[in-house]
Amino acid sequence: MLALDVRNLYKKYPHFQLKDVSFQLEKGYIMGFIGANGAGKTTTLKSILKMIQTDSGEIRILGKNIAEHELELKQEIGCAFGGTDFYTRTKIKTLTDVVKKFYTNWNDDTYSNYLRKFKLDENKKIAELSTGMKVKYNLALALSHGAKLLVLDEPTSGLDPVARDDLLDIFQELVLDGEVSILFSTHITSDLEKCADFITFIANGQIIASAEKDDFKESYRLLSGSESQLPQVKEQLISYKVNSFGFTGLIHANDFDSSTDIKATTPSLEEIMIYFAKKEDIHA
């Protein structure tokens, strides 16, 4: 069963548009949603949650169309977007007492466990929390009502490396039984290298690829060679850099002739993002 099925999302703004965004997330897996700032990640996530109205397209969550079952499905979704910027003079406990009334499956014990795990003091005011603590509070709320789909926008930003690692462990524990699925956007690609099962890559409002993580990386090659070798592959490269040692460039694996003596390696997620961003800069 699909936890999330996004079909042909289209949304036009004066200077930006989502163009036929489509991807699927299988139940019980973690999908990393990557792309440069301004690529359309947050717009897509907000469209999925009906926080903004799209011009066209369809979103199905757990097999049901959210346009027809919005209130029911939002009981099944946990979401966290950046920091908590509302009611900043309010204590955590007071804000939680308001939020939990919206969820029929709210579990006080689960919530208390996450407060302890995240070392959150519920008598603190929102304004007194660091960026990282606000992220953790958002996640404690999102994880405490039995959500089957977590939609998270930059959930690890503002956390130190140890806290990020702990959070990724929690994500992996959550999907173990196959009931919970996670879609999260991030620019910290090392987090995805550790815990994501699938990658969806968006650039300039369009999905470039959506695939199993290793398959996604294997579909590209990072080439390095002397400057004299560059003309052999220049036309096929997505983008490239020239330095004193020669050149490095990204190419689709299918476009690379492995019989050449140009060195080729499988790129990291970060390298793929960097070279696609360089492509955008060239064509800007």
Image (cartoon, grey):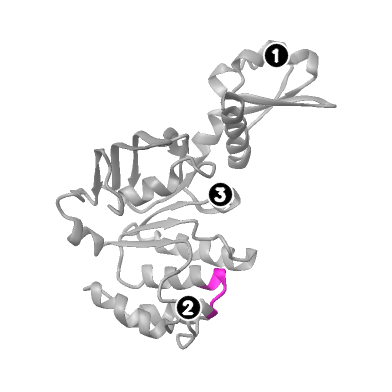
Label 3 crowd bin: few (<14), some (14–19), many (20+), radius 10 Å: some
Query: Observer-nearest residue: 113 or 270?
Result: 270
Residue furthest toward the left?
Answer: 68
Q: Earlier in the sequence, mark 3 or mark 1?
A: 3
Quickly name the residue at label 3: 187
Circle 1 sits in a helix, a strand or a loop, which is it?
loop
Q: List x then y, in percent, for residue 64.
A: 18, 49
Q: List x then y, in percent, for residue 45.
A: 37, 50
Q: Pointers 2 and 3 in contact (CB under 8 A)?
A: no
Q: Residue at x 35, y 45 (%)?
A: 25
Q: Which residues are magenta?
A: 128-133
Label 2 crowd bin: few (<14), some (14–19), many (20+), radius 10 Å: many
Most frequent secondary structure within the magenta stretch: helix
Query: Observer-nearest residue: 192 or 51?
Result: 51
Q: Quadrant of residue 28?
A: bottom left
Mark nearest the camera among 1 and 2 is 2
Q: Residue at x 73, y 19 (%)?
A: 262
The relative height of residue 20 versus residue 261 in the rendered view (above or below) is below
Q: What whole-number distance in Å separates the C-alpha atoms at marks 2 and 3? A: 25 Å
Quickly name the residue at label 2: 126
Report the amino acid beneath label 3: His
Q: Pointers 3 and 1 in contact (CB under 8 A)?
A: no
Report the amino acid beneath label 2: Ile
Quickly name the residue at label 1: 260
Q: List x then y, in percent, for residue 35.
A: 51, 41
Q: Is residue 202 left or right of residue 230?
A: left
